[in-house]
Every structure is written in C-alpha cells, then in structure tokens.
C-alpha cells in the first residue's frame, strides 16, 4: 500500500502540473477502474498508464458515412473531461471535425501519421461501397480505410454505423454501406476490430477500452460480435432501474402517465432492453446524468448488431414479419399465429361436417370395415 | 487565375469539398460540393411513422434534437395532435439546450481558430495565475511535439490580428468552452435521456414527467450556463470584434433570409415563436414576409439526381444517380432549395434579423445595443456578412439561455396548478399528410411526411445546410455560400484562411445537407493555374 | 367385458402424456403473459416474476417429459415402440391414410397403435419440443439446470436466427404450433372415438381401449 501511495503521489503531482485537479483525476481513475471491473488498488496503475510521461497515445479518427454524433459524444466525456481527453490524455492527431488545419495541410498530417504508425485508429461511420456515394479528397472511402488501417496498432469501430452500417445501412441501404469488419474482410486485411456498438457511442466505453489498452497492452476480451465483454455481456433489462416494476408486473401504458412518473417498466411501450446487451443502466450518458429509459424513453436497441432494421418499429414489442408470397405484407407474430389457429379450427369444422355427412360418425358403424 | 480545392474542409460537420477560383487576390467564383449520399428519404419509406423521429435524428449528430422535433411536429400535424403545455415547454428546453451547446461549440471550436492564433499565445505575458497556468499547459503541449488537433494549421498567417494576450485568453476559453458545451448537452440529457440522440420527444409531446429534483437541477444548470455566456462568451465576442471590423462587409451573399421560427409559445402560432417565422429579401430589406412551405422547390439541375423539374418537398423525389464531378453540369449531392425561386440564407443571422424586424423585444434590445457598441446604431444592414453571423449566434445563445430559465419556472408554475400533462395520446390515421417547420441551430429545417396504410409513403427533409451549401439552381444562380465567397480577399492561396472564415460563418453541417448528402470532405488542396 | 378391452397405455405412458399436456398449457398461458402482460400487479406483487418462474418450471417439466417418453420408447417393458416412428415406413403409408381423411377413400389399412400421420405428427412434435427449448434457452439469461450458462452455451441459436428479436418470434411461432397441434389432436381423438367406437378418447385416462370387433 505504502509503495502504491508513493507512485500515486508522484503521478498526481505530474497530473496537477498539467492543470488537471488531483480530485478530478482520481475520480476519473476510480470511475475507469470500476468500469473495467478492477479494484481500487488499480487506480495508481491507471494513473501511471495515462500519465506515461513520454508520449500520449496518438489517435487517428476517420469519419465515413456518419453524422459525427460519435465525435459529439467524444467531446461530452466526463472523467477525463473533454479538454483533458483531447489535450492531456490522447493525442488526437486527426479528426476533421475538431482539427485546426484544413485542406492540403490536413493531408500532410495524415500522411505523417501513417509514416510514424503506431496509432489507434478510430473509425466513425460505415463505408459506402457504391461508387461515388462516399468520397474524401477525391478517394473512395473504402480506399481511405485501406490506406490507414495498415499502420494502426488497434482499430476501434465506434458507433453502430462503423460496426455494421447503422441507420444509413437500413433497408434498402441506398449506398450499400458496410461496417469496418466487413470492409476489412473485403479488402483482405486481417486485423481484429473492437466494435463499440451504440448510437452514438458511449464515450466512457471508448476511454475505458483505450485505458485498458494502455494498462495491459492489449485489447479487451470480446464477444462473438467483437464487442468488449466488459460492457456487452448483460442485457439492459437485467440491470435496469425499472426492473423491479417488470418483475412486479407494473407497466407504463401511455407516455407521460402517472405510471411513467412512478417509474414503471416500459416493456409494453416497445422497450428493447430485454434483447439489448449493453451496460447503459450503469454507465448512463452525459456524465451519468441520465439515460434513455431513465428519462422515460424506451430502449430502441441501438447497442445490437443489425440495429436498426432488427428492432424497427421501435415502439412495437417485436419487429413485424414479412409474410412470404404476399409481396411485403407485414404482420406481427401474434397475428400470424392466431390466424393459423383460426384456419385450423375452421378446417376442423369443415372436416367434422364432412365426417358426419359421409356417415363416418354419428349413429352408424365406424368407417373401418 | 488560381484555382484551389479545399478538401477536406475541416471544423465543420461532415465532408465538404470547396472549389474556388481566385483572380487579383479575390475570389472570383466558387463551387460547393457534398460528396456523401446516405439516402434517408429512401430508407424511411414503408416504415412505422413513429420511427421517423428516431431515424431522422441520425441525419445529424450535431443537431439531432432539431430533426427529432421537426419530425415529431410533422406527425403532430399529420395526426392532428397537440402536445400539452408542459410537453411543449419541455421540447423547447431540450431544443434550447442544444442551441446553446451548438453555438458554444461552433464559436470556440469550429470557427475561433480562424481568428485566434494559438502559437502566438505563447508570446503573451499574462499577469493572472490562471492564465499563466494555461500558458504553461500550452507550452508543455507544444514542447511534447504532439500538437494533436492544433497541428499544421495556418499559424502566423498575416490575417491573424489579435495581440498575444487576447490569443492566450481565447485559448483558455477554448478549453473552458469544451467543458461548457458538454454541460449544455447535459441539460438536453436531463430531460432527453442522452445527447446526442435524445429519446423522449415522440409525436404527442414528451415521454417523461419531470420530477422536482430534475427541475431544481435544471434551474441550477441553466443559471451556470447563463453566467458563463454573459461573462465569457459575449465578452469574448466583444473583445475580438474590434480587431476584425474590416470583415463587417465581407461575404454578404444574396442577403435573402429565411426563418421558419423556433421555440413554440402557447398559441402555437409560428409568428409568435421566441424566434418567429419570416423571410427577408434583399430588395426590401428588412421588411418581413410570410414564407409559405408551398413556395419551396428543390432544383436538381446541378445535383446527382434523376429528374428535371424543381419539385415541392411534399411531392419530392430522391433518386440518386452519380455522374462524376463536373461543375458545368452536376457537382454535388446537395439539392438546391429555393423559396419563390430565390436562394435563401438560413441560420442565426436570419433568425435574429427576422426577430428584430418583426419587433421581438429581446432581439431588438440585444441587436440595438450591439449596433450602438460598434457605432452603427439603427443600421442593421451592417450585420450582413461574416461578423454579423458571429454576433447573431452569440446574441441568440444568450437569448435562448435566458428564456430557458423562464421556461423552467413556467413548468413549475404549471405543476403547482396541477397541470402535469406532457403527452397527448393519438391513433395513427390510415392516411395523413403533415409538415414540420422548425429551426436547427444552423437554420431553417422542414420535414414533409405522407402516411398511407399507417406506414410512411413519402418523406422529404429540407435541411439548413442544404439551403446554405446548395449548388447553382436551374437559372444558374449560386447557392448562398458560393455567392458569399465571391469577392472575398485571399492573401495567400496556399493558406486560404479567409475562405475558411466565410464558410465557417455559415456553420455548415454536411451530414444534414443531403440528409441524403454528405459532401466530399475536402482533403487535398490542389493548386491549379489556368 | 374385460376380454373385449385391450390395455393400450400403461400408467407410465398416461402420466407422461398428461404431464406434458399440463406443462404445455401452463407454458402457453404464462408465455402469453410474458409476451404481453395483460394484467397489472399491485403493490408488493411479483406477478411477472411468478409467471416467469412457472414458465421455467414448466419448461423443465416438458423437457423431462420428453426425455421420459424417449426412454419409454426404447426401454419400456410394457411397450417399447420406437420402431413405430420410422420416418420412411410412415411416409409410405401417408397416401393411404390421408386419402381416407380427405374423403377420397372410404377406408384405410389397419395400422398398429399409430397411423402414419399420427406417428409423423408425434415425431414432429418431439422435434418441436427440442426447437422451442433451444429458442427458450437462448432467451434465458441465467444458468440452466443450475450448471449450464445459457447465454454462453446457446448464443449460437441467437446468432443463427438473426438476433434475439427473431429468437422471440420463432419461440412464439413454436407456441402456436403447439396450440394448433393440441386442437387437431383433440379433434382426431374425438373423431376416431366416434367413428371407430373403440373408446380411443377415454383410453388415455383409463388405459383401456375396445378390441377390434372383427
């Protein structure tokens, strides 16, 4: 413990020198330790990893078919705050939305990053594969990815667009947008990608993955969709603050109702919490001030691969099912099942009448002679 | 004659490519091109209409809430449902916090670096300990050789005119503003669940009944924002402005302005919104006209779409066809919206001018005192151009933040009277049509919805940056940014800082533009001499 | 009288049949509630929790019922009937029995305990129990039988069907197949009892059926 305090003290001095208050910094490291599922004992190690005096980890942030919502999320960071994250913790060498340079000078920066290599490549937005539908500097976005994926030490796909195309890749996917993993496969580049599904990404997930990388020198353990298990192993439903009302059978039937103000469960309003794996209820958003369900908005499932189509319509409990052979006619599973049961019952009635008419039943001898 | 292409254009949302022709040290002609197509209108077809307000938020990550609200309003209109008083106010609050967030972010992080020389700040000799600390931090930062977002910019350009001390102060406030924009977004999140992508404003009102703690928390947070805007933001604008007064007349553009109006009052009359509806045309400036959504058409003769006729968005089509970049024919994914065949500038300047000319008292007071401060009392026409756009955003930010405090009190008053409703129920009709006309921080935003069989049959959005960044129309008339660029002096075509200033003054947001289009990001600056 | 009767179902078969029936009925009822909670719980209630609890208990029961039935099919000293479920043999008999049921033929051949359609339907339902259990397991977040991690071991079902929304949809479709099966099964029992006059319907309670008079 003594030894740890020594290290902590040393690093905190260094931190304070850089203009972050000791309290804020410890708070941040504590929050990160909790996120990573580590004990408080790791706090000084996290501090050390972040404050590795020599070099801040360089980050190249590429924007493809996105709406920059994830860049917006990045600068809503908590601990560290956006200013510290952007200037003290990371070296964000390339991000078109916040960088001072423009045009030719920007291209030089990117070329320089590629030459030096060793950067963390963060990709925001999916990659259009239809010609001319997504270009940067006269190059197809797919080629831009190809060029910059090679020298990266780690690739993070942030937000639903980057992981699997997201909203702009929803049916009929007009620009044939694909996620980073699929794009790399198409390009023949075999590099593992950390997928941070969510629309937009939760910046705490992002910083925790980077800290984890700095701390342990490796990327976190991933699930079968490439998402870090530390954030995507439990459903929203299982950790929801409204879960007790679900178990009790108390549900919101109308928005803004008395039931809503009592915090009842949003299950019947189409909440996708039961089928969405993410630590949202614990980490929340915007400095943990609130989150979707906390504010009475049913989960729309944006943490799952294949969102949006797999969860539309958002206010229905389950997506509609296209009935084959009826050219796009959609119905719910309940209606299809009930219709099949009614048809069966009708068939039976007809059969019973037939059996009576043919004399198989009713008074006379049986049919088997 | 020199020809420059700035690609990517940075410190804007999305990807914009800019082609500029320079002659005699001035811009002779300009072309703006959006190069990413995402096709939201196509995606929306056949879906449950209630999903539209979530999906359209993904048009833009900077102003998602405005899209969400406009979409919900188009359905309010189509489903004939009206949010109750507190629902209306809560939508205003969530929207207002986004305005404050967006304007702070725009001023400090997107445009300030066109006026503030970060490297020059190292030469300052600050007296205050806090500024000294910032300077030390900046020094350490520069010495680390990892300049991050500040690398390779036009530092030392002759058009930077602030003294080192002011540069340092601005850098300090750049950092502070990063925290403040996040705090403003927290206010949206308080009632919207999260920001970006709020979750609580479906058609009919809002989902959540605010608790007493929420409201108390809210008032405290708004007060903090108000103080910061009054004591830092507005002061910074006033301190910087005198050094750039030569920009007052630059980049006037067409001087036609459109505002659909934003922040609903209890009458639900768009002309009585906090920032009212209206259009101003150059020929009878500043007379306010009543803009009609029927008069909006979208020209596509220079955009990558099939079709020939300009169409009204209610019957609009989106049928993409990429034919390569050719500025004499088609060169962008952005359509060219026109109001009565006129190109219109949209944004804070348009809103504040319309509010001023319509007699909105707060806007009049703010603008009059600003005009007096710069020695042009009673001459609102000096606001046309770059400096006016900056001033209008700062003043609007203050106006909205001040109103937000009052809205919080209004909700408390309503709750006291037992009026707690925030949502009105409705049935989705089998067929319906609706229009939502509202404002994003970047300008006039319209959503047109057509429902058939309880599903979306057609959906069209005409978004702020499309108005501003659009190409030439069928008559060859330039879009507002193209027009504004003409005549801009450029000292060094290799470092076209002045061009950045003009483009940034419109706060372009390209994800929006084509909601459908993401303009090509300006990555390479080619240099052609012809 | 006793001589006319044939001992069709011993106690083990009958109990197993009714255990499976009751568990299916309970599963359908609780399943409907879990899918769309049609009653609200008051203060201090655990309505949904109980519904889910019974749903899981009945799911285990149904699975065990199937295991017992399969054991009996191979090891019953009374009647190990697994050979009756041969797919090829039964498919060959379908035209004959189907022809009879759709009134194309006036009579059908004499089959043992199960006619070909019956045997195939029962076999299909056994597979349905397996399918519904797999989809159920993929939706279950806890530990199955106390030692199998459901999320880890059955995640592949969810991936195969395209995500948990679709697992739920398949789970619901499966339920409707059970409902439809029960309706048809009950009708056929009544129909055959009435046409053959051999007490088929009551045999599943008493175990005894009338011998063929011929």
Image: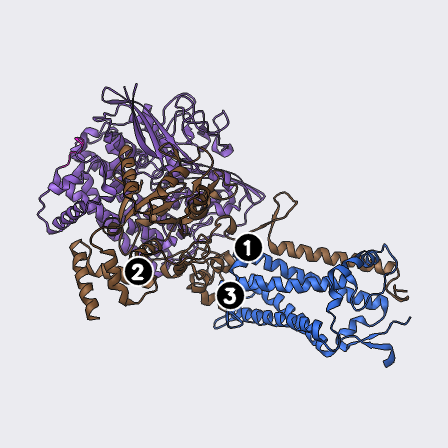
- Same subunit under labels 2 and 1? no
Quadrant (top left/top right/bottom left/bottom right) for the N terminus of chain A = bottom left
Mark 3 chain: C
| Labels 3 and 2 within one chain | no
Image location (x, y in percent) of residue C94: 79, 58
Q: Secondary structure of the magenta portion, mostly? A: loop
Comparing C77 with B494, the one in front is C77
Residue B458: x and y in percent read: 52, 38
Q: Is residue A120 magenta?
A: no
From the image, state whether disc 3 or disc 2 is nearer to you: 3
Which residue, given by chain and number where applicable, does mark 2 sit on? Answer: A32
Question: Which color is chain C depicted in?
Answer: blue
Separation (CA) of disc 2 from disc 1: 35 Å
Q: Can you see residue B264?
A: no
Whole-percent x, y for residue B254 in the image: 32, 25
| Residue B161 belongs to the span the image colors magenta | yes
* Disc marking residue C150: 3
User: What colour scheme does the image use?
Assistant: by chain
Q: Which numbered circle lies on residue A276?
A: none
Q: Which chain is brown?
A: A
> Magenta residues?
B157-162
Q: Is residue C114 left or right of residue A255?
A: right
Q: Vertical placement of B210 versus A312: above or below?
A: below
Q: Residue B317 in the image: x percent, y percent?
A: 50, 32
């Amino acid at each position: 413990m003594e030894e740890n305090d020594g290290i902590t003290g040393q690093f905190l001095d260094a931190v304070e020198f850089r203009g972050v208050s000791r309290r804020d910094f410890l708070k941040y490291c504590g929050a990160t330790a909790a996120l990573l599922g580590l004990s408080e004992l790791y706090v000084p190690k996290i501090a050390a990893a972040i404050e590795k005096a020599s070099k801040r980890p360089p980050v190249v942030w590429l924007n493809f078919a996105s709406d920059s919502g994830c860049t917006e999320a990045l600068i809503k960071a908590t601990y560290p705050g956006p200013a510290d994250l952007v200037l003290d913790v990371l070296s964000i060498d390339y991000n078109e939305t916040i960088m001072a340079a423009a045009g030719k000078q920007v291209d030089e920066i990117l070329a320089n990053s590629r030459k030096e290599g060793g950067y963390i490549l963060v990709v925001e937005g999916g990659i259009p594969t239809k010609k001319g539908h997504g270009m940067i500097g006269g190059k197809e976005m797919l080629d831009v990815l190809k060029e910059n994926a090679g020298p990266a030490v780690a690739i993070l796909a942030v937000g639903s667009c980057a992981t699997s195309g997201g909203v702009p890749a929803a049916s009929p996917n007009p620009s044939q947008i694909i996620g980073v993993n699929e794009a790399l496969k198409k390009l023949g580049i075999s590099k593992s990608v950390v997928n941070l599904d969510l629309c937009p990404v939760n910046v705490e997930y992002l910083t925790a993955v980077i800290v984890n990388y700095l701390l342990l020198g490796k990327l976190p353990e991933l699930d079968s969709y490439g998402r870090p298990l530390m954030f995507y192993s439990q459903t929203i439903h299982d950790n929801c603050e409204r879960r007790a009302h679900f178990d009790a059978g108390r549900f919101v039937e109308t928005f803004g109702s008395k039931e809503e103000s009592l915090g009842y469960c949003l299950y019947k309003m189409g909440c996708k919490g039961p089928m969405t794996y993410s630590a949202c209820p614990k980490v929340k958003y915007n400095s943990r001030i609130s989150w979707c369900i906390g504010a009475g908005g049913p989960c729309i499932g944006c943490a799952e691969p294949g969102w949006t189509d797999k969860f539309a319509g958002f206010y229905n409990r389950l997506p509609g099912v296209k009935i084959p052979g009826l050219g796009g006619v959609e119905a719910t599973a309940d209606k299809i099942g009930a219709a099949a049961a009614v048809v069966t019952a009708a068939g039976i009635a007809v059969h019973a009448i037939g059996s009576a008419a043919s004399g198989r039943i009713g008074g006379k001898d049986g049919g088997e002679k | 004659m020199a020809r420059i292409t700035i690609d990517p254009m940075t410190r804007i949302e999305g990807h914009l490519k800019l082609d500029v022709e320079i002659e005699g040290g001035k811009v002779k002609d300009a072309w703006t091109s959006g190069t990413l197509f995402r096709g939201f209108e196509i995606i929306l077809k056949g879906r449950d209409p209630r999903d539209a307000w979530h999906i359209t938020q993904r048009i833009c990550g900077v102003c998602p809430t405005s899209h969400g609200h406009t979409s919900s309003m188009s359905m309010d209109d189509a489903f004939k449902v009206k949010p109750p008083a507190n629902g209306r106010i809560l939508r205003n609050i969530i929207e207002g916090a986004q305005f404050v967030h967006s304007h702070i972010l725009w001023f400090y992080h997107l445009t300030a670096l066109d006026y503030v020389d970060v490297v020059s700040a190292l030469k300052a000799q600050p007296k205050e300990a806090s500024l000294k600390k910032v300077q030390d931090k900046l020094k350490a930062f520069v010495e680390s050789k990892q300049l991050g977002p500040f690398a390779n910019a036009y530092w030392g350009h002759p058009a930077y005119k602030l003294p080192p001390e002011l540069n340092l102060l601005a850098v300090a406030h750049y950092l502070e503003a990063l925290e403040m924009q996040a705090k403003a977004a927290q206010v949206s999140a308080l009632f919207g669940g999260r920001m970006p992508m709020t979750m609580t404003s479906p058609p009919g009102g809002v989902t959540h009944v605010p608790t007493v703690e929420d409201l108390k928390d809210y008032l405290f947070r708004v007060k903090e924002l108000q103080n910061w805007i009054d004591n830092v933001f507005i002061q910074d604008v006033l301190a910087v402005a005198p050094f750039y007064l030569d920009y007052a007349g630059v980049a006037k553009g067409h001087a036609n302005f459109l505002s659909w109006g934003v922040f609903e009052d209890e009458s639900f009359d768009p002309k009585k919104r906090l920032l009212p509806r209206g259009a101003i045309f150059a020929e009878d400036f500043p007379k306010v006209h009543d803009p009609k959504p029927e008069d909006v058409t979208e020209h596509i003769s220079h955009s990558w779409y099939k079709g020939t006729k300009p169409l009204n968005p209610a019957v609009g089509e989106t049928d993409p066809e990429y034919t390569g970049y050719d500025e004499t024919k088609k060169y962008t994914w952005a359509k060219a919206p026109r109001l009565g065949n006129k190109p219109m500038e949209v944004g804070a300047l348009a809103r504040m001018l319309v509010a001023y000319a319509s007699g909105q008292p707060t806007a009049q007071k703010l603008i009059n005192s600003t005009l007096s401060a710069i020695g042009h009392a009673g001459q609102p026409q000096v606001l046309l151009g770059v400096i006016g756009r900056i001033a209008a955003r700062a003043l609007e930010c203050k106006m909205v933040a001040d109103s937000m405090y009052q809205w919080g009190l209004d909700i408390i008053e309503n709750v006291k009277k037992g009026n707690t409703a925030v949502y009105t129920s409705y049935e989705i009709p089998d067929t319906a049509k609706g229009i939502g006309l509202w404002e994003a921080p970047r300008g006039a935003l319209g959503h047109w919805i057509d429902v058939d069989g309880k599903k979306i049959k057609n959906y069209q959005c005409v978004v702020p940056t499309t108005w501003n960044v659009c190409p030439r129309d069928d008559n060859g008339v330039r879009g507002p940014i193209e027009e504004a660029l003409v005549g801009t002096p450029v000292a060094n075509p290799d470092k076209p800082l002045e061009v950045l200033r003009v483009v940034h003054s419109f706060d372009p947001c390209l994800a929006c533009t084509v909601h459908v289009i993401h303009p090509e990001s300006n990555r390479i600056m080619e240099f052609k001499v012809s | 009288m006793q001589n006319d009767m044939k001992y069709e179902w011993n106690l083990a078969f009958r109990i197993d049949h009714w255990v499976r029936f009751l568990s299916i009925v309970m599963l359908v009822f609780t399943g409907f509630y879990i899918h769309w909670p049609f009653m609200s719980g008051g203060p201090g209630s655990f309505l949904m929790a109980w519904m889910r609890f019974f749903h899981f208990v009945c799911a285990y029961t149904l699975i065990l019922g199937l295991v017992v039935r399969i054991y009996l099919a191979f090891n019953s000293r009374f009647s190990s009937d697994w050979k009756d479920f041969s797919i090829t043999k039964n498919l060959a008999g379908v035209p004959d029995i189907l022809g009879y049921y759709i009134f194309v033929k006036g009579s059908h051949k004499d089959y043992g305990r199960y006619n070909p359609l019956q045997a195939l339907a029962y076999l299909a339902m056994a597979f349905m129990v397996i399918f519904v259990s797999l989809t159920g397991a993929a939706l279950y977040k806890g530990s199955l039988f106390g030692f199998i991690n459901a999320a880890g071991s059955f995640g592949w079902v969810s991936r195969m069907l395209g995500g948990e929304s679709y697992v739920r949809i398949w789970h619901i479709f499966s339920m409707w197949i059970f409902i439809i099966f029960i309706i048809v099964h009950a009708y056929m029992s009544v129909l055959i009892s009435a046409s053959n006059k051999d007490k088929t319907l009551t045999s599943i309670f008493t175990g005894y059926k009338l011998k063929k008079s011929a």
